[in-house]
Image: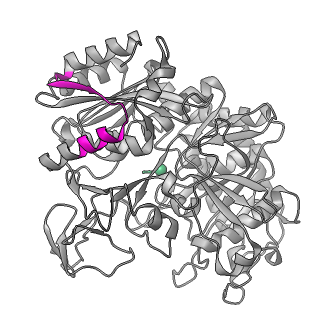
Amino acid sequence: MTENKKLKEWVKEMANMCRPERIVWIEGSEEEKIRLEKEAFLTGELIQLNQEKLPGCVYHRTAVNDVARTEHLTFICTKKQEDAGPTNNWMSPKDAYSKAKEIFSGSMKGRTMYVVPFSMGPIGSEFSKVGVELTDSIYVVLNMRIMTRIGKSVLEPLGKDGKFTECLHSKAELDINKRLILHFPQDNAIWSVGSGYGGNVLLGKKCLSLRIASYLARDEGWLAEHMLIMGIEEPDGHIEYIAAAFPSACGKTNLAMLVLPQGLKKKGYKIWTVGDDIAWMRIDTDGSLWAINPETGFFGVAPGTNSHTNPNAMKTIQRNSIYTNVLLKKDGTVWWEDGDEEAPKEGIDWRGLPWKSGMLDENGKPIPGAHPNSRFTAPISQCPTASFRLEQHHGVPISAIIFGGRRAHLAPLVYESFSWQHGVYVGATMASERTAAQFGLQGEVRRDPMAMLPFCGYNMADYFRHWLQMGSKMIKPPKIFHVNWFRTNERGKFIWPGFSENLRVLEWILERCNNKVEAEKTPIGYIPYAKDIDLTGLELPKGALERLLVIDKKQWLQELEEQKDFFKIFSDNLPCEIIEEWQALKKRFANLKTLNAS
Ligand code: OXD
Ligand code: MN
């Protein structure tokens, strides 16, 4: 299927190590998909769902100890440890290859090795990167089919000597003690073994599009980011695009495809979804930043997705989707906590065990039917708000970059940075509080610069430097904002309703980008005057918006100390611009006599 010498040799070499029974090159056709599904139904790797209610949908369960990204088993394998930096696990390439070779050796015995050529980004676009994933999992092939462009059409432009990222995956024994997710940025290679969970094995996603891509992007002068991309069309047809970075499980998918809140419907906006997880951004000849979503699908968290939080996702996943680790109902449909339906009386849970509504564990806690990190994989093209620019090689121009985290108190609903450099500092000091669903102390603040902590493929101090340099190369850099949908009141309840209503904040952001509204200058940045957030049709308690915009000096002084502790891990390598911004913020607070401090 290919004339590419390097590809042919590499497939042969990897097959010699993994020893599959056969090798199948994936061409990407519909017939091939049906053939693979049938095969997986026979072995139980997949279960066909009720085809009347969920046409084209299938179901899969991963091993019980293999339900999330295993960050502690994820390594950046550069020759020098300092190139991976203090925030990544590091292993020397020599050790990594030798450890992984032991696990890969003979791991595909009796299995088929699928060769999946894929393109991240429209085939042939200047933005795009080609990868080839070798895998012994049909589930992986079918997911890659939704999440990326795969098959013959990718190999043609690769030609005889085109470059590609080598992506090797084997489930091996699905043993957590023999699991490694290894990145070799200097070899443009990824080796993942011992897992079947999406984030570890769909190698085009986090591994290539963020870790390897961020490394390539630094060398080639662009940005690979953990960001959604969406367009907001005004009634006159003009569309502004924004890119937003929030840590995992903070609502990127919901924001990317929001529906208009009732109260703003008459304004006639239209939302366009470009992507919900990854943005690749380049400076174009016009001196501004343009972005593509390299993916073609959503790999979204099911629990909590419903017709209130995300009606467009609910419409997207009714057909041709893969459901993983949700509850399987007796009628061959699926269910998850905080979805649209009441819990069924019974079903088979994500572990494959009989489940009854109201079942409790030994500590008296409800036993979930779906795993909290259960997922749907669905094509973006099925999303009612899918952008018409998804296949355009140029991408979309970005007017605003938004950073955000989950902070119960500190950060106001929204603020605008003073400059690109200040915005990079805002992104570099991003943080989020752990929720009950995450391991660790509830409420504990976890620093997650640009939401890239688990995904930056090189030293994060150099990553900040790269961001700073990108700013100086742009004639019209996007403005940088910070949002926090999660401020709570004294009873611990969210003050801002979130979801659709977030459009009211995006509206202000775009007005600022177009110099249409004034804003109040505070030490942390510009915040809206309460009158400038359109609350038409939204019943907020009196004074709530003002409370959402309060900046508490005491809390910020404490935050500055915590940031200082975080910076220490980068020692001398932290760019001086970041330190300057920290000092300037401290000074602005010191010079302040009074502030609307609570
Ligand atoms: C994530 C994801 O973990 O997108 O960020 O799956
Ligand atoms: Mn993500």
- Which sits in the foreground, 475 or 291? 291
Per the rendered image, the range of residues in magenta is: 18-37
The image quarter containing residue 51 is bottom left
The image quarter containing residue 571 is top right
- Which sits in the foreground, 554 or 331? 331
Q: As displayed, is residue 417 above or below residue 83?
A: below
**Residue for point 30% across, 18% down:** 11
Q: Outermost residue, left direction?
A: 110
- Which sits in the foreground, 434 or 470? 470
Q: Is residue 29 magenta?
A: yes
Horizontal and vertical percent position of residue 553: 71, 67
Left or right: 458 as drawn, with respect to 416: left
In the rendered image, the quadrant that contains the C terminus is bottom right
In the rendered image, the quadrant that contains the N terminus is top left
Q: As displayed, is residue 569 above or below residue 368?
A: above
Q: Is residue 501 magenta?
A: no
For the question of whether residue 92 can be seen, the reply is yes
Horizontal and vertical percent position of residue 150: 42, 34
**Residue for point 20% across, 79% down:** 364
The color scheme shown is one colour
